[in-house]
Amino acid sequence: MLIIQVKEGENIDRAIKRYRRKYRNTKVLQEIRDRKEYTKPSVSRREQLKKAQYKEQFLLEQEK
């Protein structure tokens, strides 16, 4: 459970914004979406490899 302390004199909109940021950083929504349908382990491994290849290519291009 996420707890947001509203500081003295703080705008409620600002506190809601902090709550949303904290919620997004916990990746709860992403996990719910991932669990919505089953993915085979081989497919998830393939996606991880593809992501790693993309990331490596991106970093190599940044160095140039």
Image: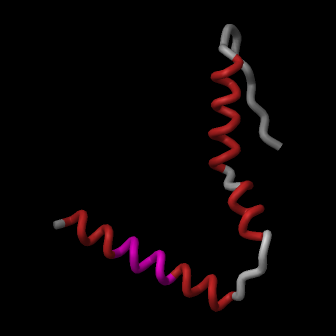
The residue depicted at 21 percent of the width and 65 percent of the height is 63
Residue that protrudes farthest toward the bottom in the picture: 42
Residue 7, picture quadrant: top right
On the rendered structure, is 47 left or right of 42?
A: left
Residue 17 position in % (x across, y down): 64, 30
On the rendered structure, is 29 left or right of 42?
A: right
Above or below, 15 against 1 in this view is: above
Residue that protrudes farthest toward the left in the picture: 64
Residue 64 position in % (x across, y down): 16, 67
Residue 52 position in % (x across, y down): 45, 77
Per the rendered image, the range of residues in magenta is 49-56
Residue 15 position in % (x across, y down): 68, 25
Q: Which quarter of the rendered picture does the N terminus lie within?
A: top right
The residue depicted at 24 percent of the width and 69 percent of the height is 61
Residue 33, picture quadrant: bottom right
Above or below, 35 against 29 in this view is: below
On the rendered structure, is 20 left or right of 52?
A: right
- The secondary structure making up most of the magenta span is helix
53 part of magenta stretch: yes
31 part of magenta stretch: no
